[in-house]
Amino acid sequence: MNKQMNIEEQLRPYIEDVEKVVLYNQEKVLDAFQNKRVSDRHFHSETGYGYDDEGRETLEGVYAEIFRGEDALVRPQFVSGTHAISTAFFGTLRPGDKLVYITGDPYDTLEKVIASSAGEDNGSLDDYGIGYESLPLFEGGVDVDRLSEVMTPETKMVALQRSKGYADRPSFTIDEIEEVIREVRKIRSDVVVFVDNCYGEFVETKEPLEVGADLIAGSLIKNPGGGIVRTGGYIAGRKELIHKCANRLTAPGLGKGMGASLSVLQEMYQGIFLAPHTVGEALKGALFTAKYLEEEGFVSKPSFDEKRTDLIQAVHFQEAKQMIEFCRQIQAASPVNAFVTPEPSPLPGYDSEVIMAAGTFIQGASLELTADGPVRPPYMAFVQGGLTYEHVKIAVKRAVEAIKL
């Protein structure tokens, strides 16, 4: 207990910094609710085709203001963050265009979106004649000196992945994203800049659209759902691009005008209102995780005293057995399915078996405390989320004690 108290004393200035960000973002969200005149009538949605759904339309206005976009698409029909990102790609790109990822290869789950496996025709970008290239990172950052090599005349969209995902590299801060976008614009002012914003919402006081991005996307079972939204995703940005994305999500000519929200509008409103606070709880948990693991002799990134731009805390292990056991102990300290023992297994979109500890109220919700990762060298578990700071402290402490026995 004395050790834990000492750790928390050292973390106090960093936790105070988190609380300042929470306060700023909470006021920004509150202002958006008030400016859009949100009322309890907006919690009642239409059925069937979803025509004239005032609640849905107002919610999208709230998102647009919060993220500083001209428009937004916020729908339960998005099944995941990957689906929202895929919709942004297919909505914006056309045959003959080229997509360039300048933060290295994206999440494993986007590989099949970009190109089908040999001999398959899955409807990937490649199947539609849309080109793709990724620019490897240089010393952990975007290789700006090589941007002109990959940004050919066919390049329609330049994409950045803000969070490290399952990669052993730093996540990109808003300041870093702004600097990279500035370099991109020097080469091509007309290219569409897309940022995968998953895990990053409300971690800083600015979002990518505020520093020059044209389009962002994310999942509602991550940060903006506040821990209570059961499904869905969002895309925000320039109005004409959102119109194209809406035509891809529904059908050309239908766009944003259709799509019943059924019974989820109230939780979507309440989730985005709670999001700054809940993200703050998860960030405090990440600070504790980093410092506690460091004190126990583990390699964990980022360090507790590094600037943060997402929720993810990577923990390095010497062997697969230790990584798997750590994840199992996080599961054992969960409020849901604590009695279940996770096993590495195949997962759609991944080439390696994945171990997932997710004793969550909402399936796959990464704003709740989870620990997971592909079981492959280097062996890393990615700890993220935590609805309450207290739960993270309990779970991480128990997990470390168990694997050190």
Image (cartoon, rainbow, N blue to C red):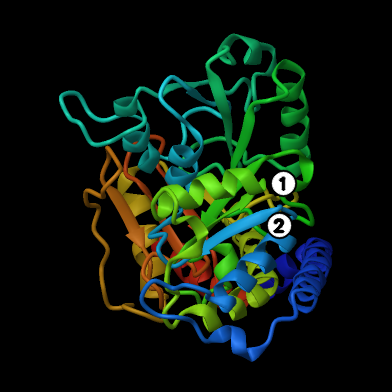
Amino acid type assigned to the residue bearing label 1 in the image: Leu
Quarter of the image where one finds residue 124:
top left
- Residue at the limit of the structure toward the left, as seen here: 119
Distance CA(mark 2)–CA(mark 1): 7 Å
Q: Name which quarter of the figure residue 349 lies in.
A: top left
The quarter of the rendered structure image containing the N terminus is bottom right
Query: Residue extending furthest bottom?
Result: 40
Amino acid tagged 2: Phe
Q: Which residue is mark 1?
A: 209
Q: Is 126 or 358 nearer to us in this picture?
A: 126
Q: Which residue is mark 2?
A: 67
Seen in the image, is 113 located left or right of residue 18? left
Residue shown at 59%/16% (left/top)? 151
In the picture, measured across the screen, residue 142 lies left or right of residue 126, that is right
Q: In the image, residue 183 lies at what x, y percent?
A: 75, 22
Compared with residue 159, is residue 284 higher up or lower down, i.e. above or below? below
